[in-house]
Image (tube, rainbow, N blue to C red):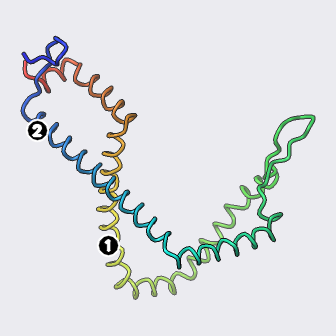
Amino acid sequence: MPSNGNGSPTQVLRAPFKHVLKAGSYTATTVNSAVDGTMDSCTECVDSVLKNKYVKSVTNQITSFGDGALNKFAPVTSKVSPWVSPLVKKTKPYAPAAAVTVVALATPPVLTFCAIVAFFTAPIWMFFGLITSFIWVPALIIFSAFAIVFGTFAAFVAGVRYASSPSGQAKLTRVWRKVSGSPMGQKLFFVN
C-alpha cells in the first residue's frame, strides 16, 4: 500500500474517482487563473483610464461640483439617527404602530380595487398584449435561455471560487472526511 509520507498507509482511489480528482483540480486551477487574470486586466485597464489627463480633468470637475452641491444640501443628506429617550434608553421605531396597522388594513382593499380595474380593462390591455406578443414572447424566450446559461455559468464559477478559498476548502475537507470515512464511502471510493 502507498504511504502518505509520514509512514501511515494511504488509501488508493478507484479509477473513476482519480479521473474526477484530476479533472476537478484542472478545472479549479483554470477557473481561478482565468478569473484572477481577468480581474488583474480590469484593474490595469481602469488604472490606465484613470491616469488619462482628460479623465482626470472631468473627474475633478465632477468632484468639485458634487462637493459644492453636497455642501449646500448637507442638512438634507445627513444621516438619520433614531431618537433615544435619555430616561428609557430604548430606541423608538421609525414607523409608529398605528401607521403599520393602517397600511396592513388598507392593503387588501387597494389590491382588490387594482384587481377590479385590471378585470374591467382586460379587453384593452390583453388585445395589445396579444398583438405585441409576436415581439415580446420570442424576446422573452431568448432572454430566458441566455439568463439560464449565464446564471449556471456564474454559479459554477462562484462555486469553484468559493471551494478554492480557505473556508470553502475547510468545509469540503470536512464533508469529504465524513463521507469517505463511512463504511459505504470506503467501499465506494477506495480500492480494498
Secondary structure under tag 1 reads helix
In the image shown, does 129 or 19 lie closer to the viewer? 19
Q: Relative to 192, is 150 on the left or the right?
A: right
Where does the image place residue 120, in percent across and percent down from the top left? 58, 80
Q: Earlier in the sequence, mark 1 or mark 2?
A: 2
- What amino acid type should be assigned to the residue bearing mark 1? Ile
In the image shown, does 176 or 167 lie closer to the viewer? 167
Q: Give the distance between the C-alpha atoms of the residues marked 1 and 2, in whole angstroms.
A: 37 Å
Secondary structure under tag 2 reads helix
Q: Of discs 1 and 2, which sits in the foreground?
A: 2
Which corner quadrant holds the C terminus?
A: top left
Q: In the figure, residue 165 lies in which quadrant?
A: top left
Q: Residue at x 13, y 20 (%)?
A: 11
Q: Is residue 131 above or below residue 72?
A: below
Q: In the figure, residue 152 lies in which quadrant?
A: bottom left
Which corner quadrant holds the N terminus?
A: top left
- What amino acid type should be assigned to the residue bearing mark 2? His
Residue at which label 1 appears: 141
Where does the image place residue 42, in percent across and percent down from the top left? 39, 63
Where does the image place residue 31, in percent across and percent down from the top left? 27, 51
Q: Residue furthest right?
A: 87
Q: Relative to 49, is 74 on the left or the right?
A: right
Report the disc number at residue 19: 2
Dot 1 crowding, Cα within 10 Å, few <14, some 14–19, many 20+: few
Q: Is residue 142 above or below residue 5?
A: below
Q: Residue at x 76, y 53 (%)?
A: 100
Q: Residue at x 30, y 50 (%)?
A: 156
